[in-house]
Amino acid sequence: MATRGPSPVAPPRVRARGTAKLLTLFRPTTGLLRAKGVVSATNAVLHPWLKEQLSEVLDELEKKQPAETLPPEAERAHYAQWKTWLWPHENDEGLPPLRIVLVWDNLAGHLTPDLVVWLFHHGVMPLYTPVGGSWLNMAESVQRIIVPRALAGQHPKNPQQVIDWLEQTVAGWNVNPTPFVWNGKRRRRRERARTRRLAGSSAAMIRGYSIAS
């Protein structure tokens, strides 16, 4: 299943005679990034874009594995069952097969009834990160990579320039995307760099901390 997290309400911002924002939908397992630069991220902007992107993803999933070929709900993997996420609050009666788990922030605009109903009836389970837990949303992490790349050495004159650079950087990222995995290559590179700063000795570290002598 795909875990996706748009972060449109509090995205990276650049003041340049206005504000540029980046709507982001990210699939960590493949590294593929869907994003759109905008000057405003209100519900009227976010919700249609999100529905459009999710509909495209759902169409791709349907082509790869049509819903009628899926095993019964009880025989699917634990994470692919509605009851895993809904119990004990709701039941899955009348819902289509679960196709996407959408991870995003616990913001008022993400709780809009019309949008939540649309998600459920299209096989999308919205999973809200706890307050103060935005680091769990990997869209936040990939934005911290994209934005510095897009703006490094640049001197924008208006928001549209920033938007163009962000979208160009996203296109470049998708040519060779990096999957995000817990305890993956990125973390191991950081650990190696930390070891080198400690004179290259692994014995200088216990669970990530220097040894006091």
Image: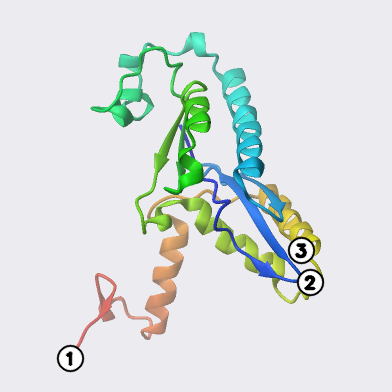
The mark nearer the N terminus, 1 or 3, is: 3
Quadrant where the C terminus is found in the figure = bottom left
Q: CA distance from mark 1 to mark 3?
A: 53 Å
Residue named by callout 1:
213
| Contact check, label 2 and label 3, Cβ < 8 Å | yes
**Label 1 crowd (10 A; few <14 / some 14-19 / many >=20):** few
| Foreground label between 2 and 3 | 3
Quadrant hosting residue 149: bottom right
Q: Which mark is residue 111?
A: none
Q: Name the kind of residue labelled 2 in the image.
A: Pro
Does 192 appear above or below 204?
above
Give the residue furthest to the top.
68
| Foreground label between 1 and 3 | 3
Q: Which mark is residue 159?
A: 3
Does 162 appear above or below 117?
below
Depth check, front residue: 196 or 178: 178
Quadrant where the N terminus is found in the figure = top left
Q: Secondary structure at mark 1?
A: loop
Q: Which mark is residue 156?
A: 2
**Label 2 crowd (10 A; few <14 / some 14-19 / many >=20):** some
| Contact check, label 1 and label 2, Cβ < 8 Å | no
Does 152 appear above or below 212?
above
Q: Residue at x 57, y 51 (%)?
A: 178
Q: Residue at x 40, y 53 (%)?
A: 136
